[in-house]
Amino acid sequence: MTGSIAAVGAGLAVIGAGIGIGQIGGHAMDAIARQPEASGKITTTMLIAAALVEGVALFGVVVSLIK
């Protein structure tokens, strides 16, 4: 039973990360469309934020799979 609960927890962590990274990318594209001259700064900030979200998701997967 704990294995299936851990799988659900890992799945939720991955789904949450996917939604979060999608939001980051979408809002970054909106920002670049509004101010194209700031695209380098926006892209750098977007990549850092996406990496942080991915790190939190990886941590969630690891914690859910540790028994």
Image: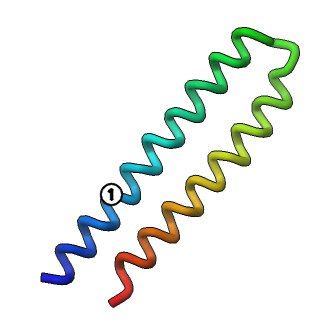
Q: Quadrant of residue 24?
A: top right
Q: Secondary structure at mark 1?
A: helix
Residue at the extreme top of the image, as rendered: 34
User: How many C-alpha atoms fall within 10 Å of the one at disc 1: few (<14), some, or many (≥20)?
Assistant: some
Image coordinates of residue 22 in percent, x first then y, are: 50, 35
Establish if 19 lies above or below 37: below
Task: Give the quadrant of residue 6.
Answer: bottom left
User: Number of marks in the image?
Assistant: 1
Q: Position of residue 61 (x, y in %)?
A: 42, 70
Residue 66, picture quadrant: bottom left
Check the picture and name the quadrant holding the N terminus.
Answer: bottom left
The residue at 64%/20% (across/down) is: 29
Left-right relation of 6 to 59: left
Residue 10 is situated, as x and y percent measured from the top left of the image, at: 34, 66
Dividing the image into 4 quarters, which one contains the C terminus? bottom left
What residue lies at 70% left-to-right and 10% top-to-bottom?
33
Going by the image, does 33 lie left or right of 59? right
Residue at 64% over, 55% down = 52
Q: Residue furthest left?
A: 1
Is residue 45 depicted above or below 57 in this figure? above
Tell me which amino acid carries mark 1: Leu
Q: Which colouring convention does the figure follow?
A: rainbow
Q: Which residue is mark 1?
A: 12
